[in-house]
Image (cartoon, helix red, strand yellow):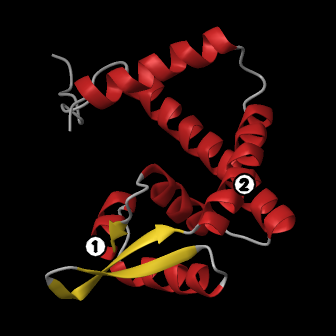
Amino acid sequence: MSAPNPRPDVGPDSKARLRLWLKLLKTTRTVESGLRENLRTEFASTLPRFDVMSALARNAGGLKMSELSGLLKVSNGNVTGIIERLVEDGHVLREPVPGDRRANRVRLTRKGEEEFARQAARHEAWVDDLLGALDADEARAITATLDRILTEGKS
């Protein structure tokens, strides 16, 4: 008689998937660390600030603060401090939302759009360099696999 499986909720492939997860995490942290350092040294900026500007660049009409924090999946408090500094630097404009006295809509100024374009071009080059071990076909294949995990994976 064989001993019962002490972990009936995992199959024989679970160790390979666990190793994959750890490798994905390490890779993500390595790439993110490189991006953070490059933004700091080249633009005296941060990755969260870049992310806020990126979200605003994709939403030219602007976003309410709650929409922005929801899009970035961070608290309103985290976004507020970043927006304050971007307003001080002339990169973001804060405008009242008609019909909602408590809400503001934020959007990039022309200066902010130009600065984000500069940073985004460098960001793309850095990512290209950091992931340079992959050719385009490999990158597309991994992207497709990760998309499949996101759409078909169990939660």
Q: Name the one closer to the observer, 153 or 78.
A: 78
Q: Residues within 10 Å of mark 1 (few under 14, many from 20)?
A: some
What secondary structure is found at the residue carrying circle 1? helix
Tell me the distance, in whole angstroms, between the alpha carbons under discs 1 and 2: 25 Å
Looking at the image, which is closer to me, 146 or 123? 123
Q: Is residue 36 above or below residue 66?
A: above
- Dividing the picture into quadrants, the one containing residue 61 is bottom left
At horizontal 40% and vertical 60% (from top left) the residue drawn is 72
- Residue in the foreground of this view, choosing between 95 and 76: 95
Tell whether label 2 touches label 1 (CB within 8 Å): no
Snapshot quadrant of residue 129: top right
Drawn side of residue 141 relative to residue 94, left or right: right
- What's the residue type where badge 1 is placed? Ser
Q: Is residue 53 left or right of residue 65?
A: right
What residue lies at 35% left-to-right and 79% top-to-bottom?
76
Say which mark, if any, is on residue 97.
none
Q: Report x, y in % for residue 89.
A: 67, 82
Classed neighbour count for the residue bearing mark 2: other residues with Cα under 10 Å, few (<14), some (14–19), many (≥20): some
Q: Is residue 36 above or below residue 26?
A: below
Please state, as top left, top right, bottom left or bottom right, where the C terminus lies in the image.
Answer: top left
Residue under the image location 62 percent in, 44 percent down = 26
| Coordinates of residue 32 in the picture (x, y in percent) | 65, 52
Q: Earlier in the sequence, mark 1 or mark 2?
A: 1
In the picture of the structure, the residue carrying the numbered disc 2 is 119
Q: Kindly identify which residue carries mark 1.
A: 66
x and y percent of residue 15 in the render? 44, 28
Across the whole image, how many numbered discs are drawn on residues?
Answer: 2
Quadrant of residue 149 in the image? top left
Q: Amino acid at mark 2?
A: Gln
Q: Secondary structure at mark 2?
A: helix
Q: Is residue 85 left or right of residue 8?
A: right
